[in-house]
Image (spheres, rainbow, N blue to C red):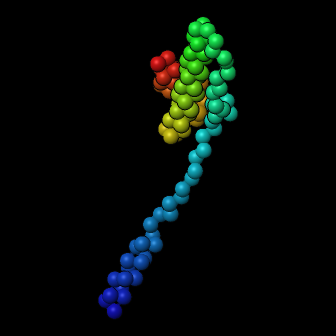
Amino acid sequence: MRRFLMISALFWVASCTPKIEYRNIVPDVPEPLRQPVTVPERRAETLADVGVILTDHVQALKKANGQIAATDCILDAVEAGQPAQVCLEPGEYTSKTLESMEN
């Protein structure tokens, strides 16, 4: 009888814990940030053409890094419980994004 009371008390205490509710939070990442960055196809016939190709690649890399930094800003803001629009306003998140784009 003593064991029955102890076991029933444990079950009662275990059933009194608060119910944990899980919510999926999906941030709104704009479509242009999810698109791949393309590099135009060029033929390299002279050394000047190679320079233009390298310039194209550097510009594409900067654009891709900017997209990654903007997406990271949106994810950081949502994880901190703030709206994604915080990345558009001057402040902590925007300065980090601009810093990443400059490097």
Q: Going by the image, does 6 lie left or right of 91?
A: left
Residue situated in front as seen by the camera: 61 or 24: 61
Quadrant including the N terminus = bottom left
Residue 9 seen by the camera: yes
Residue situated in front as seen by the camera: 95 or 66: 66
Residue situated in front as seen by the camera: 26 or 52: 52
Rendered residue at 46%/72% (across/down): 15
Rendered residue at 55%/30% (across/down): 68
Residue 66 seen by the camera: no
Rendered residue at 63%/15% (across/down): 44
The image shows residue 83 at horizontal and vertical percentages of 58, 35
Residue 41 versus residue 9 in the image, above or below: above
Q: Quadrant of residue 53?
A: top right
Q: Residue furthest left?
A: 2
Residue situated in front as seen by the camera: 77 or 98: 98
Rendered residue at 68%/33% (across/down): 31
Residue 89 versus residue 50 in the image, above or below: below
Q: Residue furthest top?
A: 48
The image shows residue 19 at horizontal and vertical percentages of 50, 63
